[in-house]
Amino acid sequence: MTFAALGLSAPLLKALVELDYEHPTPVQAAAIPPMLQGRDLWASAQTGSGKTAAFVLPILERLEATARVQALIVAPTRELAVQTEQAIARYGRHLDFPVVTCVAVGGAPIERQIQTLAAGAQIVVATPGRLLDLLEQGALSLTKLQTLVLDEADRLLSLGFHDELTALQKRLPTDLQRVLFSATFPPKVVALAELMLRDPIRINLDAGTAPGRERIEQRVIEVDESQRSRLLIHLLHVHAWPQLLVFVASRRAADDVALELSRAGFRAWPLHGELGQDTRTQTLADFKARRFQVLVATDLAARGLDIVQLPAVLNFDLPRSAADYTHRIGRTGRAGETGVAVSFVSVNNAGHFRLIEKRHHIQPEREQIPGFEPRDLTPAVRDVNGGIKGKRKSKKDKLREAKRS
Ligand code: AMP
């Protein structure tokens, strides 16, 4: 299968040759022809599957030079929006007119975005909040819109953008191609797809499974929570991964772990939502340019990061949801590369990890590393909000206690 056979023309094919894309990935082969025909589409596709090109290439193929917004791509995070804009620039560089894209995201000055729109952007890549601001201010008109893409729809909803998307739906022209990409299809996403799409083509390549499982080695290491930093440093010495993305659960943990690694002599930086936008952008750019080795990130900040050939990711803290596990390990083993995804599991979160395993039908072997064997054998009893199942008083226990006193 070739890109030419999918119906793309010379300026795009030239860019793809320059980028060394030899063949379309499965999601590209399935999505590009119906998108070129203007059909609505619902595609289950993981990050790393080549999904960005799957919708950007047909948008560029159909793009006209005229200065009006023809395509709108809605993304869950600023980082993903910026990456999509970069993909548009890469794939569209040989078109015979300049492609103007407005990245409409929060945390950046709105005035500049308004100027880019006024100058005649053909494509807008936006996060939902800023998109609605621009619509409400009358700075963005969707009357000539031809294609709407909701990228990472599951993430859009899990970040709480349901109301924004419903508000957007009311402002869309009726005659419009609508496309929805999502790694997972929980009921909320299905409901959104049903609201937004009309008679969509469904592309379901590997729904419900972890991305490119055959390319990602999943390791699970049992370790006490208090020993995780030491073990992380040990693994960095042993494996000498040129780059590693470490996931943690909170801003504070990101700062702390990055600091501990720095003290141990590794070049490590944190990435989380409470850093200023400039710092986040710079940290990400430095990591992509391989100017430092370890990025310690929270889920939100790391969402959608496209770092080519990331050899390893490590779950220092487990993700809250099974879907996030998929997103996290999808940062490695991208586009045909191999990668390793390591998860630290302690007595406190072993039950939670079993749920993730069950959901993804996986069962990686448990490992213990000599010198770091777990000693904590009973789960910590946390307060009610900390939520360790089985350790909280049941209703029955509480009633019994009340009767006794
Ligand atoms: P995505 O799933 O859109 O985040 O893309 C993952 C990575 O795959 C990006 O680095 C793309 O540049 C790369 N990629 C996308 N399509 C192809 C292709 N057909 N051949 C080789 N690499 C690709």
Image (cartoon, rainbow, N blue to C red):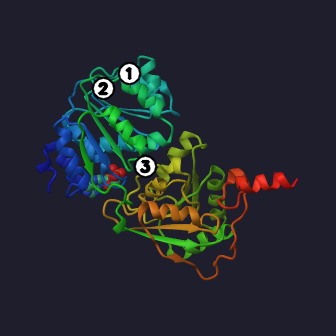
Query: In this image, 297 relative to 156: left or right?
Result: right
- What amino acid type is highlighted by mark number 3? Gly
Query: Mark 2 touching mark 3, by CB under 8 A?
Result: no
Residue underneath mark 2: 69
Residue found at x 45% / y 17%: 137
Residue underneath mark 1: 140
Residue found at x 72% / y 58%: 382
Q: CA gap, disc 1 to disc 2? A: 8 Å
Rate crowding at label 1 as few (under 14), some (14 to 19) or many (20 or more) other CA atoms within 10 Å: many
Most foreground residue, 145 or 260: 145
Residue found at x 68% / y 74%: 377
Residue underneath mark 3: 304
Q: How many marks?
A: 3
Q: Where residue 257 sits: x, y (%)? A: 64, 60
Q: Of all residues shown, which one is farthest toward the bottom? A: 370
Element under label 3? Answer: loop
- What amino acid type is highlighted by mark number 2? Val
Residue 77 visible in the displayed image: no
Query: In this image, 163 relative to 180: left or right?
Result: right
